[in-house]
Image (cartoon, rainbow, N blue to C red):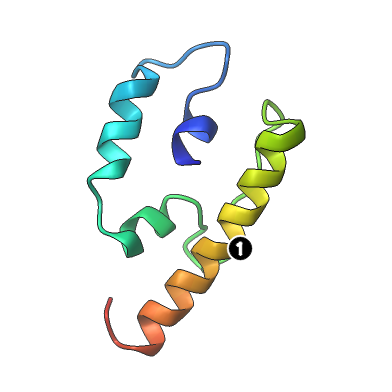
């Protein structure tokens, strides 16, 4: 989901495949952080995500918040 957020249809300085690969190699807690504010709340979803992509982003943000919460609860951070 991070790649869809970071690479809008208008373009980005880093291509979609490279952005995806960079996020894909991160451990799960760091992947979750890509979708969250520093306080653990989900980041706002950009306007360029609509329809099903927006729904996926909303679900991913909720999962990311849960992952961060569980990571801290289990002292894995």
Say which element carries label 1. helix
Label 1 belongs to which residue?
62
Residue positioned most to the right = 51
On the rendered structure, is 67 left or right of 71?
A: right
Residue 42 visible in the picture: no
Residue 73 visible in the picture: yes
What percent of the width, then of the height, locates residue 27? 25, 58
Residue positioned most to the left = 25
Quarter of the rendering occupied by the C terminus:
bottom left
Residue positioned most to the bottom = 74
Q: Quadrant of residue 16?
A: top left
Q: How many marks?
A: 1
Q: In this view, does 23 lie above or below 28?
A: above
Which residue sits at x=50%, y=62%?
Answer: 64
Which residue sits at x=46%, y=40%?
Answer: 2
What percent of the width, then of the height, locates residue 74? 34, 88
Q: In which quarter of the image is residue 60?
A: bottom right
Looking at the picture, tell me which residue is in the foreground, 14 or 50.
50
What percent of the width, then of the height, locates residue 63? 54, 64
Residue positioned most to the top = 10
On the rendered structure, is 66 left or right of 17?
A: right
Q: Is residue 46 above or below residue 29?
A: above
Which residue sits at x=37%, y=15%?
Answer: 13
Q: In which quarter of the image is residue 59?
A: bottom right
Q: In this view, does 21 lie above or below 41?
A: above
Which residue sits at x=35%, y=32%?
Answer: 20
What percent of the width, then of the height, locates residue 50? 74, 30
Neighbourhood count class around disc 1 (C-alpha, 10 Å): few under 14, some 14–19, many 20 upward = some
């Amino acid at each position: 989901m991070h790649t869809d957020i970071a690479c809008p249809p208008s373009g980005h300085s880093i291509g979609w495949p490279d952005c995806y690969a960079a996020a894909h190699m991160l451990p799960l807690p760091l992947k979750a952080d890509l979708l969250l504010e520093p306080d653990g709340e989900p980041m706002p979803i950009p306007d360029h995500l609509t329809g099903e992509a927006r729904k996926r982003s909303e679900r991913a943000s909720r999962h990311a918040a849960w992952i961060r919460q569980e990571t801290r609860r289990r002292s894995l951070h």
